[in-house]
Amino acid sequence: MLIKEILSKGEQMNASDIHLTSGENVIYRVDGELIQDKLLTDEIMMKKITTELQEISEIKLQDSESKEIDFSFGFSSLRVRGNYFYSNKLPVVALRLIPKTIKTLEDLGYPPLFKEFCKPDKGLVLVAGPTGSGKSTTLAAMLENINRTRHVHLITIEDPVEYVFEPKNALIHQRELGSDTKSFYNGLKYALRQDPDVILVGEMRDSETMELAMTAAETGHLVFSTIHTNSAATTPERIVGVFPPHQQNQVAMQLANTLLAVIYQRLLRRRDGKGRIAVIEIMVVNQAIRNLIREQKFHQIESMMQAGIKYGMVTFDDALMDVFKKGIIDKDQLQDYARDPNAMLRRAF
């Protein structure tokens, strides 16, 4: 099968995505970069690929009322999530390659503190960062730690389900938007009636979901989620700011009472070209930061993080400096990604 040859090459290249467009070369995304293959997918080949994908996924991709169709299937060591759509009336296929084996926190080289975030009976743990920064991988590793070490009922609400967990010590139910539930809010609302101990909300996209996630964390559940923010320190302000002014005092109080930690991360290319490394900022919500959130003194959180080394806190610039001093990234990346480039260069040289 042609599609199997394409997938095998993607697997060998450790690609995260494959793009197939009629009349264009196959494109692989490796370590965040798009790499063009010599194989050209003309109209005849795209028809063949479409037929093969329909056979493997058992989903009808053409002659459908919908012009965008999701599908998934297993291949070798991968779980493949695909979307079939049209551009200029021609078919296009986007494939996401997800390893079936979930990496552990040790595999990822994360500090022991991450295991501590998996132990509480209640509270809110957030993973922040831009799209493609490895948030799903981090959360999967944390949930797998819970799966291996705790006898709990774990419910996930995802869009889409990426990593599939094999129950070990935990009872696990994974729910996907569209096929299993209508929205993150609906999934979370009904999850609270399903006797959960731990809940993953794939993303906190709106105030209703945020409010319900905090309520769940407040009422005896350990809740994990992701959020698109620019730093760990700005995350509380971003959450409170989503709500109308008359609610913000109450939300700040609720967030201060429930938030356990915010992990912010970015993936940077290694200078040796051998993949990427996660640069991770960690905010542990101690009593001092809890008070700042409650009083909405958000501008003081960053300096409190700098003083919180004994709690395991790490600012992004400190994490960046660490990987630079180890020779993992180069000077240009240090300067490009630092929040205070001038200060970082003074520290580095």
Image (spheres, rainbow, N blue to C red):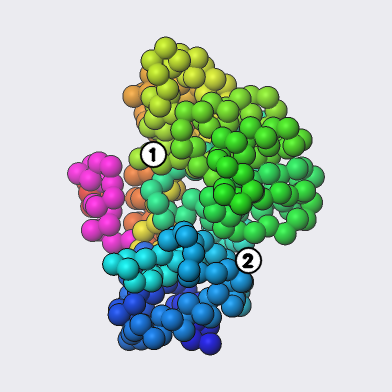
Image check: 105 left or right of 235? right
Q: Position of residue 253 (x, y in %)?
A: 51, 17
How far apart are labels 1 and 2 at the CA level?
A: 28 Å
**Magenta stretch, overall SS:** helix
Image check: 345 left or right of 180? left
Q: Nearer the viewer, residue 308 or 217?
A: 217
Q: Which residue is mark 2?
A: 101
- Give the magenta range: 329-344
Q: Say which amino acid is labelled 1.
A: Thr
Kind of element beneath mark 1: loop
How crowded pointer 2 is (Cα within 10 Å; few <14, some 14-19, many 20+) is rated as few
Residue located at (33% from left, 61% from top): 329
Q: Which residue is mark 1?
A: 229
Residue located at (34% from left, 44% from top): 317
Q: Is mark 1 in CB contact (under 8 Å) with mark 2?
A: no
In this view, 157 is above or below 291: below
Kind of element beneath mark 2: loop
Q: Nearer the viewer, residue 47 or 280?
A: 47
In this view, 333 is above or below 112: below
